[in-house]
Image: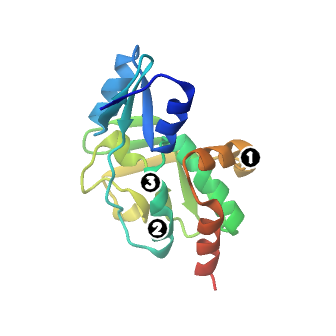
């Protein structure tokens, strides 16, 4: 386990895909551990966790391109911002949604939760398993919601122009997302 305590190491840890958890926030740490993250390093202010990787729910062409975003050190809000930013640059019609996700079996509700719905009503959500658990019947990635009866999405569309700003770009860059390559790959699907 690494130990570091300066600004350069902070950004190095972020670039390595590690998630900072303040040492004085045991509630957040418990949530991160429950979601399957593992401790990788610690310093005086943060414990650095690596998020668990999940198997995508489908093998769609769009999903195969977007799956590389799963390693981003982001929760649903940041992930939705980056995906919306990329889809807008790619010319893909979509709606960024904000609301809740509910596990119909356990009745666990996560609110707020953000995700993407594309034109054909396909969902894009890389963070449902983070909060509802890593089970085969919880969707992950690009998927048809009607095929996942255990999970219920409820929400309203956000104004996507608000998500396509410099913050979205910065989140992508900090997480090492090859924006131009992903945009080109998505545009190539429509040819």
Q: Dot 1, how many residues are within 10 Å of its Cα: few (below 14), some (14-19), or many (20+)?
A: few
Q: Residue at x 58, y 55 (%)?
A: 83
Does 45 sit above or below residue 102? above
Q: Which residue is mark 2?
A: 63
- State the image coordinates of residue 185 (x, y, percent, origin top left): 59, 74
- Residue at the extreme top of the image, as rendered: 24
Q: Residue at x 43, y 65 (%)?
A: 144
**Of 164 and 136, which appears nearest the observer?**
164
Asked where in the image residue 16 lies, by quadrant, the reply is top left
Total numbered circles: 3
Q: Secondary structure at mark 2?
A: helix
Task: State how far apart marks 3 and 1 are (Cα).
Answer: 21 Å
Q: Dot 3, how many residues are within 10 Å of its Cα: few (below 14), some (14-19), or many (20+)?
A: many
Q: Which residue is mark 1?
A: 165
Q: Which residue is mark 3?
A: 70
Asked where in the image residue 170 lies, by quadrant, the reply is top right
């Amino acid at each position: 386990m690494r130990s570091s305590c300066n600004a350069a190491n902070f950004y190095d840890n972020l670039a390595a895909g590690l998630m900072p958890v303040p040492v004085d926030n045991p509630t957040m740490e418990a949530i991160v551990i429950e979601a399957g993250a593992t401790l990788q390093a610690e310093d005086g202010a943060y414990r650095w966790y690596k998020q668990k990787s999940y198997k995508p729910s489908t093998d769609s062409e769009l999903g195969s391109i977007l799956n590389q975003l799963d390693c981003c050190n982001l929760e649903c809000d940041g992930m939705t911002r980056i995906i919306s930013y990329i889809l807008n640059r790619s010319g893909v019609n979509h709606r960024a949604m904000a609301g809740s996700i509910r596990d119909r079996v356990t009745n666990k509700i996560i609110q707020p939760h953000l995700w993407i719905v594309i034109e054909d009503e396909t969902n894009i959500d890389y963070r449902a398993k983070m909060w509802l658990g890593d089970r085969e019947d919880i969707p992950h990635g690009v998927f048809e919601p009607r095929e996942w009866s255990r999970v219920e999405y409820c929400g309203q569309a956000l104004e996507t122009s608000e998500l396509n700003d410099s913050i979205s770009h910065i989140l992508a860059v900090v997480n090492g997302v090859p924006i131009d390559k992903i945009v080109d790959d998505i545009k190539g699907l429509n040819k």
